[in-house]
Amino acid sequence: MDGKIKEAFDKFLKNIKWQRAAIAAGILGIALIFLSNFSGAFSLGEDDKFSVTTYSTQIEGDLETVIGKIQGAGKTKVLLTMENSVEYVYLGESSTKTKEIQPLIRGVLVVCEGGDEPVVVERVTDAVCKALNISTAKVCVTKLSE
């Protein structure tokens, strides 16, 4: 039985069509692996379109919505200042991202209708500090002028 299997395998290997098909499949596989490493270099993915302005605008909008619901705050406007842009950490020399570090928040200005009431200022400051994980020294709450 072993002799027949070996004989059939040798006959298969000597068939020129199968040899060419195997070589073509190998070359195609290597080409696909090679191209997969560089596919990110030729197209802009969602991560590559990151904008600090978009990021801060989104956080400002979220904060305005939440702070507006705090009792006594009323109509609210929020302004964020950012320290730097997003930072990506890559794996060695490859294009594989292992970590994304969001921009640091330097300060938050909250202007709301109840910004002259100490209780409201304390609630708003506490909410912003906890939401953004920043110190109270980075938050300013003041009254919205009419």
Image (cartoon, helix red, strand yellow):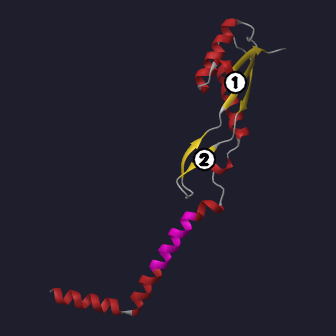
| Pointer 1 residue | 64
Q: Quadrant of residue 64?
A: top right
Front residue of 92 and 98: 92
Mark 1, mark 2: which one is toward the viewer?
2
Is disc 1 surrounded by few (<14), some (14 to 19) or many (20+) residues within 10 Å?
some
Identity of the residue furthest to the left in this view: 1
Residue 5 lies, in percent from the top left, at: 21, 86
> Residue visible at 65% across and 37% down?
103
Q: Residues within 10 Å of mark 2 (few under 14, many from 20)?
A: some
First of labels 1, 2 by sequence position = 1
Name the kind of residue labelled 2 in the image.
Tyr
Q: Residue at x 61, y 27 (%)?
A: 132
Q: Is residue 118 left or right of residue 97?
A: right
- Find residue 109 and report its image quarter: top right
Circle 1/circle 2 CB separation < 8 Å: no
Residue occupied by mark 2: 88
Q: Quadrant of the C terminus?
A: top right
> Residue at the spot x=54%, y=65% of the render?
36
Q: Nearer the viewer, residue 62 or 42?
A: 42
Q: Which residues are magenta?
A: 25-37
- Classify residue 106 as left or right of residue 3: right
Q: Is residue 27 above or below residue 3?
A: above
